[in-house]
Image (cartoon, rainbow, N blue to C red):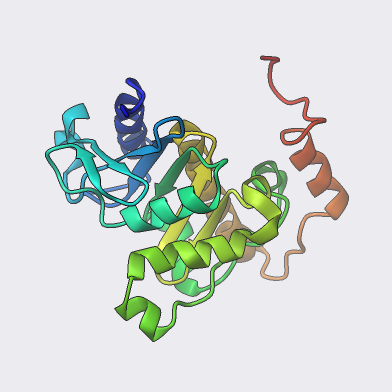
Amino acid sequence: MEIRDDLPQEVLEANLSLVGHGLVVLTWGNVSGIDRASGLVAIKPSGVPYEEMDVEDIVIVDLEGRSVKGRRNPSTDLPTHLFLYRAFPEIGGIVHTHSTWATSWAQAQREIPIFGTTHADLCPGAVPICRHLTDDEVRGAYELNTGVVLREVIGDRGIEEVPCALVPGHGPFSWGKDAAQAVERAVTLEAVARMAVLTLAIRPDAAPLAAVVVEKHFTRKHGPDAYYGQPG
């Protein structure tokens, strides 16, 4: 079965957009997207500089990681992406970066508290941090087990309430209905992470945003009663 014709180009553009948003440098980070009809995934190649990448470099694999098309090796984070696609059929795109502000929270091994409405527009609670992988999980299928801990942190709340998460000592992952939405969430996460650092610098005892305001901002952008934006 063939992958949707436009998906490799969409995934290429999503990867290149990370550079424009200042979320990646050198060869760090990756974006993937899935065509659910064919069960095929398009993902960034491993170790290829963004400025040298074209659509022919995008690697196509099946959900078991078997190569279908492409002249490059896929991102080393491919098993993480594939595990999340298998665990959550509603995910259509995934982003991983080492963006400065979100990664700083991951390295500090702290969730990102919800201080303001920008954060509440993204998710209705703290941006969670996963548990540490065990020594055996790191020595074994490390990238796959990164997907395992991300699935654990999403849990029953689902990908709308948990659109992103931090892997301790590693960095942020985000996901969405497609690669473009996953990138949008990665951009928002980086802004939220930066604002949280600055909030605590200005006022170390800053209180979380009131629950009623959190609920209002989240539900006006998400769910059946959402009214933000334009119809259609």
Q: Percent position (x, y) of residue 179?
A: 44, 35
**Measured from the top left, where is residue 202 in percent x and y?**
63, 62
In the image, is residue 118 above or below residue 230? below
Q: For this view, does 82 lie left or right of residue 140?
A: right
Closer to the camera, 228 or 86? 86
Q: In x, y percent, where is residue 99?
A: 39, 53
Residue furthest right as drawn = 212
Judge from the rendering whether residue 171 lies leftward or rightward of residue 87; answer left or right: left
Residue shown at 49%/37% (left/top)? 92
Q: Is residue 114 visible in the rendered structure shown here?
A: no
On the image, which quarter does residue 49 sit in? top left
When the figure is inspected, residue 134 is found, relative to residue 122, above or below; the finding is: below
Is 15 or 36 nearer to us in this picture? 36
Residue at the image position 84 percent from the left and 54 percent from the top: 211
Quarter holding the N terminus is top left
Residue positioned most to the bottom: 135
Q: How many numbered discs?
A: 0
Quarter of the view holding residue 220: top right
Which of the 4 image quadrants contains residue 154?
A: bottom right
User: In the image, is 129 to the left or to the right of 141?
Assistant: right
* Image spot of residue 100 (x, y percent): 40, 56
